[in-house]
Image: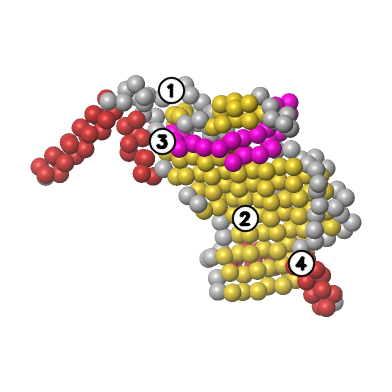
Amino acid sequence: MNKRALALSTIVLLVVVNATMGSLALYPFSERDHRPVEDAFVVDEPDEYAVDARLAVDGETVVSVEATISDTEGRYTRHVSEEVVTESYQNATSDTIHTRSVFTGESAERRVRHLRDNPDRTVVSEEWEGETVTVVSVAREPGDELDPSGAASVVTRTLLLSTYDRVSSADEQGLRVLRPQNGWYNGSRSYRLTDVSGEVRFDPTTDVIHSADVEWTLADGTPTYAHYLLVRDDAVTQEISYEYRDHGIRVDTPDWVDDAATATRGGS
């Protein structure tokens, strides 16, 4: 290392040390015993319910699920993840499951091939547009396409990164209202949450989460303030939204299901 580079690195080190020393009252030199919630926010699955959950990072959706489930009306789900959008529908009086999959990117061809090779599934239509393909298929053996709990749990577990202040013991629906907190955390890993906003509502008698609209900035790997200074430029903004209801459930048949049924009859 030449003298100029050595001098520059020394200045940077002094800036970090001075900033840290000036912040001793506010920031930890080592991990605090400030832990997030470890067990809460149950995803309920009664006979009839609807759920809409989404996790986004820096404005981009990482995972989302919309689902309407009814033993008498039928089932509909829509899952979104990286390069994949999947809708599935099942009429309450039929065993047939219709699925519409939209694949994008380099893995699209492999995903389509996987559908074609599945002996329990019949591909009804396949339409390509550039690197995007839309595939409609039918199956009679239910998989996990009509189960929203996995994606919904990813969203609700992300809420557990924070601790919460109680805003009210109960709202007009009897739900407890919580507000997430800024802070330094040392659960399974060390991280810092800043610019926290939003609220979470859940049933305190069952822990069933009913709604959430939360946003924060997450800096990972921050056991000390010096570490935080090194990683804060890599911090990400997370947005978590969740809505649940167990009344007024109605499941409508998507237009593409009717089109698939027509195509199936025409090909038979």
Task: Determine which of the numbered discs, if any, sits on residue 221 in the image.
Answer: 3
Q: Amino acid at mark 1?
A: Arg
Residue under label 2: 80
Whether residue 152 is visible to the viewer of this picture, yes or no, is no
Which of marks 4 and 1 precedes in the sequence? 1
Q: Amino acid at mark 2?
A: Val
Whether residue 75 is visible to the viewer of this picture, yes or no, is yes
Where residue 151 appears, as percent x and y from the top left, is 65, 46
Mark in front: 3 vs 2: 2
Mark in front: 1 vs 4: 4
Q: Residue at x 78, y 41 (%)?
A: 246
- Residue furthest toward the left? 3
Where residue 209 appears, as percent x and y from the top left, is 68, 35
Residue under label 4: 255
Q: CA distance from mark 1 to mark 4?
A: 54 Å
Q: Amino acid at mark 3?
A: Gly
The image quarter in which residue 121 lies = bottom right
